[in-house]
Image (cartoon, rainbow, N blue to C red):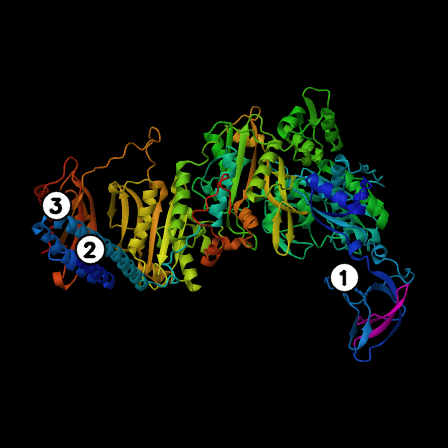
Amino acid sequence: MSDIEARTREMLLAVADASDIAALETVRISVLGKKGVLTELMKGLGAMSAEERKVMGPALNGAKDQVSAAIATRAQALNAAALDARLAQERIDVTLPPRPEIRGALHPVSQVIDEVIAIFGDMGFSVAEGPDIESDFYNFTALNIPPEHPARQMHDTFYFNEKPGGERLLLRTHTSPVQIRTMETSKPPLRIIAPGRTYRCDSDMTHTPMFHQVEGLVIDETAHMGHLKGCLTEFCKAFFEVDDVRMRFRPSHFPFTEPSAEVDIGCRRSGGELRIGEGDDWLEILGCGMVHPKVLRHGGIDPEKYQGFAFGMGIDRLAMLKYGIPDLRDFFEADLRWLRHYGFAALDIPSLAGGLSR
Amino acid sequence: MKFTLSWLREHLETNAGINEIAEKLTAIGLEVESVQDRGAALAAFTVAKVISAEQHPNADRLKLCIVDTGREQLQVVCGAPNARVGLVGVFAPAGATIPASGMVLKASKIRGADSNGMLCSASELGVSDDHEGIIELPADTPLGAPVAQVMGLDDPMIDVSITPNRPDCLGVHGIARDLAAAGAGMLKSGAVEAVQGYGPCTVDIGLRFEDVGLPACPMFAGRLVTGVKNGPSPDWLRQRLEAIGLRPISALVDITNYISYDRGRPLHVYDADKLRGKIHARLGRAGEQLHALDGNSYSVDPADCVIADDNGVLGLGGVIGGAPSGCSDATVNVFIESAYFDPLRIAATGRRHGVDSDARYRFERGVDPQFVLPGLELAARMILELCGGAASNVRVAGAAPALPEVIEFRPERVRALTGMDVADAECVRILDALGFYVDADARPMEVRAPSWRPDVHGETDLVEEIARINGFDKLPATPLPRLQPVTGVAVNISQNRVRWTKRLLAGRGMMEAVTWSFLSTKMAELFGGGGAELTLTNPISTELSVMRPSLLPNLLAAAKRNMDRGQADISLFEVGPQYAGDAPQDQSTGASGVRCAQTQPRHWTHAERAVDVFDVKADVWAVLEQLGVAQDKLRITADAPNWYHPGRSGVIRLGPKNALAAFGEVHPAILEAIDMRGPVMAFEIVLDAIPLPRVRGGTSRGPLQSSDLQPVKRDFAFIVDSAVSAGQLLSAAASGAAGLIADVSLFDLYEGERIGAGRKSLAISVTLQPREKTLTDREIDTAAEAIIAAVKKATGGELRG
């Protein structure tokens, strides 16, 4: 008995002394292996008398359990130490920079068009389009702009060479031709916006030969100038993301609307910054009015039954005002530094529910 | 259109101040561009007298002046040659701002002598260009008096921008009428009393037109004033003209300018002693020359309406007069012309000769045809008053055009179109105040526009008049009624494709450019464009003269500009219009991109990699996939347009005819032509060429088809001839064991010594997906043999040993 106790102590010491998993395994084999000390002793049980077995059996089993448990505990400790050692060795410098990803960006014009669509889309407008190369009829005649109007002169409008039949195509000077094209193909009620490229023979500090406009058109049986005011006021509040905005409708003159108005928005200039909606200054942002009866007739709509309003505003100008972009000419330069600074991330998708800008 | 407040008050009885008037003008559609209150700007400037003037000890050209300002005596250093004792002039104290320069005066030392202010010249005050010396006022001018008042400069000047439909507001009287209608005062009568003539006008006049549809000059009137004494105008007239930026010339000329601005009625005065025979209006004749009042010579065009006498052309009627027959200080007998000209012809003549005169400006917009004779009376009256003499009877040739038609007017249209609640009576009042004749008892009401309103033709014109005078501030801002509780989709699938493509490419690290729709002919020709039908007649420059056939050339130019600025690793894209012809259907929406230099900057984990064809092919692939194109239906052919490297480019086709996109390396010759460093990779997708998705019934995606049976992967390496394309081999392999093959992918390409020249090794991985039961080894072997056989048959390729 005492012999077993003494040998158990020895075995436990050997387990405790094992310095790594391999040494521990050697100890295990020497104790519990096929020819291990305890295994051999337990083999001897069969040859013992019943009396002896009754004493030695439990003693040997107890010793085996004790040593097995010690081996398991030791193994756990050694494994943990080994893992710690491995992890310590695997340490890397996590301050090293990650693999670079090239950042792309959307042009402010695309972004602002999406913002404008989000707002007017909510008011029930859908997007309409028309060609850049237009006929005299759609760009002028149908819009009640007579042949002698100054806008038709060469210094305002880009023309193409005269065709054999005498027709002379041009680059649309505004998005208004889409009004006529829409009226020709759809029946009222109409609510459309038409963003797109427009062209004028102009090039200076504030004009480029190509720019972007968005046209709006509402035709039904009751839409009046109060609706025009309400619609544009709501647009400006939503677009400039302000709770309230001061607006001024000034009588003006356009051949294709009557009455016509120019719209100013309240603003304040201080220290090079422009704040929209507040302040005592006015900034002209768009032209609008009730669609002229002649224009309705040109579009095949009876002005005694239907009426409505139209408006047109500069998309580039809206972008400049909202995002503080100083120079229109830079819009078309494709300077990467400018695009990185004023551009928008692909995931900056404007919506009314999620917000127009960050 | 410029005028002063006091001038306005000649026509409008009002207590309103300058700010109130300015606000009202803008509110009724006469937009105020600026208000110049020179009285306010000159508030600090007073009358002072030089009581001593001595030589500056340290400067030859300067004097030390002691000035008496009426309150104190101050020393001022002055460099004006006319500074002398006894001169009464304009004194600006320290702290005053000089209007012309914006400089703020400070008390200072000039060459060691104290100077406490300044004696001013007329140019420094901004009242004229005269900077020869300091202003000299009459000796009895009270010292200390405000200069603005003494010099008649305390009259604020208003500049309004008049829209082209309102020629009646190119005269102060018309502006006053609008203001009065809007409640800003009472309009004074503009009636002109006729001047009794002494007898027949000895200058004969006439109209000589043949075969002209609309007469170029329907009415021509004139009269003679004999025995006048021309010379400088009186101060009030000079000041009024100067205040609006006109240079006084002589009383006779100033009177015509004055009436032009006062009544919107241009006139012309001739020195009657320089006229020969009958003065008549007619069309010009080729070869005629006019030496005009502006000092230029003009070659008369047969389409011009001219005024002529027996000696030839006297002037371009309604545009500019001739110098030889003009009035001078020596003029004794003056012939006054008051005529009505066809606005369109005036505009054409003005444009043709590039003359921007006040007369043209008014005539081309349309002057009041009923004011031809009153204008003439007014001119005669003023000439008699200012220059003396005697006026002959009036001679008239032709007649004023007919009065406008009657317009039927329903006041309820005002409410229907504007949403403003304007009572019938107020509608009538406004129209009446604007000079319209209204029969309010008729149903509908009958309205006739006054002769000075050529812009009014129909009922909505009347609605506009009432709305603007009633005030747009009274427009009730009304939300548009919602069409549905939840608003529908605003964009169609094509428009959405544009939006998706932009965001997808930006998400792939590309920067979106917006470049011109036009380019140079040379660039257009390099890219298959430059045709005559797409060439502008009047481009802004040769660089922007033709519509672009493709987005690529302008993108390449943009990439080059960035390269020249030292930017590396450029990737730009644009989604926008391109033009194959001038018809609407020839315009398509393209999505193109360029990538040059490295894919990424250098990094510690990997070496740099130059962009290659497969970067742009991936861009195209990604866009097509996003837009719902099934890739297994696409074919790639090697016939890209000739601006691509012929061996490093492809066209992606859906069916034999429909090319969706081209991609590849830009042809080195193109790069050389635009002086750009290569290589450059590019792609061009025609978004409009991508078929729209079939309309599906509903939004369900159907059940997921997946197998629990383990797929099997087998790798094969084939040796093929170099000319065999990977695409050929892949599609051959895919056809090898039909029904079993789920995927074929290429994972290695080897060309080199080990397999010999003219050959290459392509290694593919084939995934076999069992459908019903696990594949046996035998079945797998059979499939592998079928794949090998199919590849061999299609490409001659052998399994690599």
Closer to us: B322 or A354: A354
The numbered disc on residue B748 is 2
Q: Quadrant of residue B614?
A: bottom left
- The answer to whether B275 is drawn above or below residue B98 in the figure is above
User: Do callouts 3 and 1 mark residues in contact (Cβ within 8 Å)?
Assistant: no
Decide which of tag 3 and tag 2 comes sooner along the chain.
Answer: 2
Residue A118 on image: x %, y %: 49, 39
Q: Position of residue B583 (x, y in %)?
A: 41, 40
| Chain identity of mark 3 | B
Residue ID at (85%, 60%): B46
Q: Is any part of residue B586 visible from this angle?
A: yes
Mark 3 or mark 1, whichever is nearer to me: 3
Position of B130 relative to A214 (above/below):
below
Q: Are marks 3 and 1 on the same chain?
A: yes
In this picture, which residue range is highlighted in magenta?
B61-83
Identify the residue at the far front of this view: A51
Magenta stretch encompasses residue B178 = no
Do tag 1 and tag 2 residues touch (Cβ < 8 Å)?
Answer: no
Left or right relative to B265: residue A305: left
Q: Residues within 10 Å of mark 1 (few under 14, many from 20)?
A: many
Q: Mark 1 belongs to which amino acid?
A: Thr
Compute the Cα span from label 1 to label 2. Answer: 82 Å
Residue where numbered disc 3 is placed: B787
> Is B693 on the left-hand or right-hand side of B53?
left
Q: Report which quarter residue B202 is drawn in.
A: top right
Q: Position of residue A303 (x, y in %)?
A: 56, 26
| Secondary structure under the numbered disc 3 in the rendered image | helix
Picture layout, residue A106 above or below residue B77? above
